[in-house]
Image: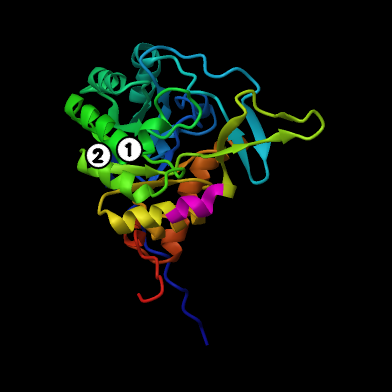
Amino acid sequence: MVRKKAPPPKKCDMSVVIGRLKMANPVMVASGCFGYGEEVNRFYPVNRLGAIMVKGTTLEPRPGNPPPRMAETPSGMLNAIGLQNVGVDAFLKVKLPFLRRVGVPCVVNINGRTVDEYAELARRLDGVPGIGALEVNISCPNVKEGGIEFGSSPEGATRVVEAVRKATRHTLITKLSPNSADVRVVARACVNAGSDALSAINTLVGIAVDAKTRRPVLRNVTGGLSGPAVKPVGLRVVWQVSQALKVPVVGMGGIVTGEDAAEYLIAGASAVAVGTANYLEPTAALKVVEGLEEFCREEGLGRVGDLVGTLKTPGK
């Protein structure tokens, strides 16, 4: 008997749209973990990615926190970089032209010490060719002013998002903190204030201790925990937020493989971002793209969006 060969898995449509941001696939790279893409472009064409979330951008250049400001932890890392960046003017003049040239969608992560600073950043970036969206970072735990102080309450989140929404026509993705009492309350406030989408999660606050010296490993004492250790938290937040609000969510936290990305989509994310894995392997994000494509083909999916929100919880 001659056995028939199984038909090859059908091609899956990997394209995703978040607001007005159009991506060839749902895999981004997380802000602060990829620079501006130029260095990694030596290893693979970064336009294979869905989008690049560039390093957190502020009005003026920032040197960040004093070292040591990174520490390896079991299944992850702590960082207290403190938003070191070149500032918005240098970003527009020096960094953005490369992203335009290679043709990869760019999401600019913006950070301010005050509500007015967030709004001014949004104004300067409004309508700039090559920018596909803004990620409003109200959840950075490693700065003394701004950051998480806005994202820890619905009132603070509302003030920032409303101001940014008035200042720009760009798609807004607000970045949520897992350190708030109920992330769904803050998420709802962001959407009501004008955010088109949400991203989750930012890092968890932690410390590392040197037992020999009895001192903290990080000069800042506390840092943001990321990597595979936080994936269960990221999945939980994405699931909770996507259940509560019908807006796109970009899931992040511990994504290393295509199957990790699929888990986030199943939990309710419309797209994902690869962060800490980029430090271990420069081609990590590309491998996630390829792994997710393979997963979708093996599952016989016609489009990657068919995965989104398909988690079968008890009672479903």
- Label 2 is placed on what type of residue? Ser
Q: Residue at x 37, y 21 (%)?
A: 113
Q: Which residue is label 1 attached to?
A: 174
**Res. 283 visible in picture:** no
Give me the residue at 63% from left, 19% from top: 67
The magenta stretch is 230-236
Q: Nearer the viewer, residue 61 or 160?
A: 160
Viewed as shown, does residue 315 lie left or right of 171?
right
- At which x and y percent is residue 47? 40, 34
**Vertical comparison of 239 with 173: above or below:** below
Picture layout, residue 182 above or below residue 157 = below
- 1 on left or right of 309: right
Q: Quadrant of the C terminus?
A: bottom left
Could you tell me if the residues under marks 2 and 1 are in contact, i.e. CB atoms within 8 Å?
yes
Of the two numbered discs 2 and 1 on the same chain, state the one appearing first in sequence.
Answer: 1
The image shows residue 71 at horizontal and vertical percentages of 66, 32
Q: Amino acid at mark 1?
A: Thr
Tell me where residue 102 sits by quadrant: top left
Q: Residues within 10 Å of mark 2 (few under 14, many from 20)?
A: many
Position of residue 294 measured from the top left corner of the image (x, y, whole percent): 47, 57
Residue 307 location, quadrant: bottom left
Q: What kind of colouring is applied to the model shown?
A: rainbow
Q: Residue at x 42, y 22 (%)?
A: 145
Kindly identify which numbered label has been placed on residue 195.
Answer: 2
Q: Could you tell me how many numbered marks the image carries?
A: 2
**x, y percentage for residue 211?**
79, 35
Dominant SS of magenta comes to helix
